[in-house]
Each structure stands twice: as C-alpha cells, then as structure tokens.
Image: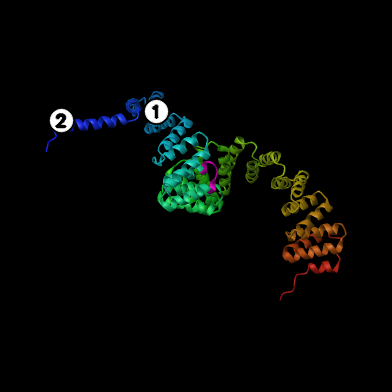
Amino acid sequence: MHLIKPRCILWAICAVFLINILSLPAQSKPEKAKKKASAIEEAKLQREAMAWFKQAEAMIGTADENTEAQAELFRKAIQAKPDFLEAHYNLGLVYANQKKMKEAAGEFETVLKIEPKFDPDIYLLLASAYQEDGNAGAAIAAIEEGLRRKSRDPGFLKALAYLHTNNKNDSAAIEYLQQLLEVDPSDKSAHMDLALLFHRGNEIEPAIAHYREALKLEPGDYAAHYNLALLYMRQNRHADAAVELEAASRIRPGDPDLLERLGDAYAFQQKHDKASAAYKSALEKADDRGKLSAKLGFSLANLNRLEEAAAALEVAANLSEKNADVLFLLGDLYSDLKRYDESVAAYKKSIEINPKQKEVHYNLGTLFAEQSNPSDAIAELRMAVQLDPDYASAWANLALVAEKLDLDVEAIQAHEKVIALGKGRALNHFHLGILYAKSSRIDSSIAAFARAIEMEPDKYRALLKEELKKVHSVLDPVRYRESFTRLLESAPSP
C-alpha cells in the first residue's frame, strides 16, 4: 500500500478551489466590488449626515436654537441621508417654532412615511401645524388617526374637542369632551369647556351642572362662579346669582363688571342698599359711568334718597344724552322734589328722544294738570291714550282735565272708557252723573249717581247734599226726581 503525501492532498484542494472560481459568472468580481463601494459610500454619507445632525443638535438650549442656521444643518443632514428620520422630526419642530407651519407639517408627514409606527404623539404636532396653517380638516383628520392608534387617549380627545370647538362644531366637541370625562371624570378643564359649550348653545341646565362640577374640583375658579351667576340671573334666581358673584368678588376684588352684575342681582331682590353700594364701588373703576350712574340713581330712588338719586341720574344724563329712560326717571325725581320746571324739562327731553313713551306723556300731562295747566295737560294725556287705547289711568286723568275745559262730550267718553276697561271707581260714576245731568240725560245721570253711592255711600251722599244747597246747581235737572231723592236717604238700620 502506498501512502499519499500531504503535499498532494493540498494540491488537490487547491485544484478544486480553482475549478470553482473558474466556474463563476464573468461579472461576479465587479459586482462585489460595486457593492463594496456602495457600502463604503453609504457609510460615508451616514457619517456626513450624522455630523450635520450633531452640529444642529448642539444648538439646542442655545441662542441658535430654532434659527435658520439650525434648520439649514438639519436640511444638510437630510440631503446626505434622505431617510434620516430624526433629522426630519427635528426640522419639523424647528419649522413649527418658526411658525412655518406648512413646512412643519411636511416634515412630520415624512417622518410617518419613513416610520408609520412612529410615536403616535406626532399626530398632535401634525394637527397643530395644520391648524395654524388654516387647514382645519387636515388637523382633525390627523388627530382622528392618532386616536385610532391610542384609543380613548385623553390628550387626543381633548385636542379633537378643541379643534371642533374652534370650528364651531359644538355637537362634535361636546361628544369628545363627554368621552374624555368618561375616561377621567376629574378633568376640571373638560367640565369647564363643556359648560361653556352648553352655555353658548343656551342649554342652561347642563351648563349649570358642569360649572358646578368644575367648582367642586376647583372652588376658586373665577370664571365658573361668574358664568354660573349669569345663568342664574337668566333663570331669575337672583339670590343664587348673588352668592356666586360674591364668591367671584372674593377671588378678584374690585372688578367693575362683576360689581355691576352684583348690584343688579341685589336690585332684583329689592336689596337696594347693597345694590347702591355695589354700584358705587363699580363706578370707581368703570369705563361706562353713564350706565352705572343710572343704575345707582334707580337704587337710591328706591331707598327714597331722592337728592342723591337725582345727582346720580344727572351724571348719567350728561354722559348719555340719548337715554330716554334716565330722563324719564329724572323727571319723576324732580317732580317728587317739587322742582317742577326741571321735571317738565326732563320729561320733554325724554319724549324728544322717544316720542312713543306713553308713561312719560301720562306723567307730563298729569304734572301739567296739577300745575293748573289743563291745555298742555290734555294734549299729553290724549297722546298717552293714543299710544295705548287701554291705558285706564290716562283715560281717568283725561276725563277730569276735559271736564275742567268744559269738553263734556270728551269727558263723558273718557269716564265711560275707564269703566269699560274694568277700572271704574266711584269718582268716575259720580262725575258721569254730573255730566249726564248737564246734558239732560236724566236716567243715565241717576243711574251713575246710584253706582257711586253704592261704592262709597257716605262720601257721595254728602257731596250730593252739599251740591243741592246751591241755588243754581248742575243737579237741577234731577233735583226733583223721586228716584234721585231716594238715593240721598240713608239706608235703614238693620
């Protein structure tokens, strides 16, 4: 047996290796070289991109952060390596801080194309960029996509509610806020946002409920107290409104708008001492002193502090010359203070501003009558009943003034109108009796006297008896009628 020498084995192995090499395709060697060159180039670009990126990153926390210089470095990193995810993300942040929202949105979209499973919170950034760029639909779509990735996430629910609120889609905003409160019932801001949305939609009861929940979570919330008070005022719950406004005032003392509202709440409760104090405090800082002075004057008038009330209303009238109501009340006050010329002047100014104020015509006409000026009085009283044909008080005064002017037909019609309106008094029937007697309507006269005596027997029997003592009397046409004579006899004692 012959042994094979080791050298021969080595040669055999080499021979097999050579055969294998020779059997490879002709391009194998160049392709390998190409791949190697490509890998080297990629590594070079990676190093270049990372170098730019690190330079940009080094600017964070310095004066160069978010500058165009930092943005340029991130862009160079992306040019070197287009799929450099972190560079796109950071460049998006820089653009967002530079308020280049369209560019920011583009970078965040690129991040999601490179890595669809990137942190879902990027959708919040993307939505913010779209919203700031004026593309509300895209912003909402971005948050909805984020919510699909993070179901019932409070941040996404809150963002969606905010976006829908901004776009006046209140029903959708309410829906997302309600979902948010299902996840976190202690979210005070969600309760406040819901309350404001319901408030804006005039859904008072749910608005009140959420303001109350917000106050349970944060008793010192000024806006919740103030807005809750406004809703209570709308419900005429003035005592409850005052409680909330007092709480708000402790949080923010001296706020003139709040103090005015507080004065209103007190005034509606007829607590005019507290109301006047609140209005006075508001006047110290208020811009609209005319309106506040008018309110102060009203409360002081209700406290019978007439001089002070008139002074406050004079301020209001000087600051707001077109306020007919202020001049109306000022006319009343001047009349009560026996400053009659000033009263007439105030009433006339009020009518100049608004000629259709039946009460002012009535008050002015009544004042003229009291001042023995029936001609002017009847003109104003006629205007009052013209403006309101059912104005019983004006008809009553018109009847008396017409009678003084010997306008008997007009006086009769006015007295009859008062009675027809169901407001007739013994006085009206008595005067009708006299007027009917003067016009020889005997039966009507006696019937009218009978009604007056029925309503106030002692007074009108005495007046008729006194009138009969005159030699010539308006009662002469009925004096000797038996039915009239019986009226003057006192009823027999039981």
| Cβ atoms under marks 1 and 2 closer than 8 Å | no
Which of 416/323 is in front? 323
Q: Amino acid at mark 2?
A: Arg
In the rendered image, the residue lying farthest to the front is: 1
Residue 443 circle label: none
Which of 29/457 is in front? 29
**What residue is at 74 percent from the left and 54 percent from the top?**
390
Residue 265 falls left or right of residue 189: right
Q: Is residue 434 above or below residue 376?
A: below
Residue 269 falls left or right of residue 29: right
Residue occupied by mark 2: 7
CA–CA distance between discs 1 and 2?
Answer: 58 Å
Looking at the rendering, which quadrant does residue 110 occupy? top left
Residue 272 is situated, as x and y percent measured from the top left of the image, at: 53, 49
**Colouring scheme applied when the structure was drawn:** rainbow
The N terminus, quarter of image: top left
Residue occupied by mark 1: 78
Q: Secondary structure at mark 2?
A: helix
Magenta stretch: dominant SS? helix
Residue 186 is situated, as x and y percent measured from the top left of the image, at: 40, 51
Q: Is residue 360 above or below residue 67?
A: below
In the rendered image, the residue lying farthest to the bottom is: 494
Give, as a single range, the part of the protein colored magenta. 164-171
Residue 172 is situated, as x and y percent measured from the top left of the image, at: 52, 48
Q: Amino acid at mark 1?
A: Ile
